[in-house]
Amino acid sequence: MNYQSDTSSLLALAAELAPRSGYNATSFPSVRILRSETILEDVPVLYRPGAVFVLQGFKQGFLNGEIYRYDAEHYLAVSVPVPFRMASQASPAQPLLAIYFDFDLHLAAEIATTLNGQAGHDERMQARSLISSRMAPAMTDVLQRLLHALHHPQELTILGPGLLRELHYRVLVGPQGGSLMAALHRNDTTDRIVQSLALIRERYKEGLSVSELAVTAGMSVPSYHVAFKSLTGNTPIQYLKALRLHEARLMIARRQGTLAVIAAEVGYASPAQFSRDFKRHFHRTPSEEAKWMREHLGEPIQA
């Protein structure tokens, strides 16, 4: 069958899969489609490792003084989960439609390892957490075929795994794929920071200190601090606080307890301090943010 890889066709396929505002699940847990009809400014986000393909409208990410544009001509790749700020353009007449694709990290690392062994690969590329790359015809084509398969269960069953593998590959060989592969394949320093991020994710509720994290990573505090900020755009303390607040945000939206219970659950000894930090980070009170999330992102999936 001949598929036309054009913007209008992509939009039509995506729009049918995303009838509601917010995130729309698909038959693949790793693929979601966002529909948004609102202009958003200075929104704190924490993306999973993967890629975001905006088919209509546009988004901009802001991290450590850099701007990352992702729109119909650019996609955003994320190698490690990092908190950053986001703005987007959309309207009811032209809603933002975007495909959110979560990496299978084992598959991505496998492909990165194979590519690292190929001639012409520059192993000196610096690892980066966020990367904005220009869309290429091959990327548009695989997205077209993936969206088409999501409309046809039999086709999805037979071709889906191969399409997801190809999508991983296309991202990793993209214009800035070398920086992404450097984060996935990892040199010694990057590996230590990625392992440290995993430790923070496991123990974010505890009173972790920078010195403890540095010792665990086998680095001096100054070296750890520099390497951590180089990869994530955040200091270790900024990262830990943002992770706690984003986790609390989800728990509040899911109605998983009172504010005091949730504050304690994410590592805050003082509910009052938690409320202050939450409003400073999200610019809304916890109850206002939970309402905003349901309006703009949809009802959160239960953990």
Image (cartoon, helix red, strand yellow):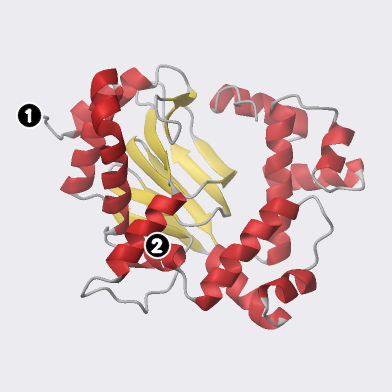
Secondary structure at numbered mark 2: helix
The residue under the point 32% across, 40% down is 164
Residue 293 in view in this figure: yes
Is residue 152 visible from the viewing direction of this image?
Answer: no
Judged from the image, the secondary structure of the residue bearing numbered disc 1 is loop
The correct choice, above or below, for 145 with respect to 74 in the image is above
Foreground pick, 157 / 34? 157
1 or 2: tag closer to the N-terminus: 1
Which quadrant, please, contains the C terminus?
A: top right
**Residue 2 - label:** 1
Vertical relation: 48 (above or below) 6: below
- Indicate the quadrant where residue 5 lies: top left
Using the image as rendered, state which of residue 79 and residue 6 is in the foreground.
Answer: 79
Residue at image mark 2:
180
For residue 209, which numbered disc appears in the image?
none
Do the residues bearing badges 1 and 2 touch, measured as CB atoms within 8 Å?
A: no
Give the quarter of the image for residue 91: top left
Which residue is found at the position 73% from the left and 48% from the top?
A: 244
Task: Pinpoint residue 144: horizontal percent, then vertical percent.
Answer: 22, 33
Residue 163 x/y as whole percent: 26, 39
Q: Residues within 10 Å of mark 1 (few under 14, many from 20)?
A: few
- Answer with left or right where residue 268 lies relative to residue 282: right
**Mark 2 neighbour class, 10 Å CA radius: few under 14, some 14 to 19, many 20 or more:** many
| Towards the viewer: 183 or 75 | 183
Q: Is residue 233 left or right of residue 79?
A: right
Say which amino acid is labelled 1. Asn
Question: Could you say where residue 271 lies in the image, as x and y percent from the top left?
Answer: 90, 41
Could you tell me the amino acid type at mark 2? Leu
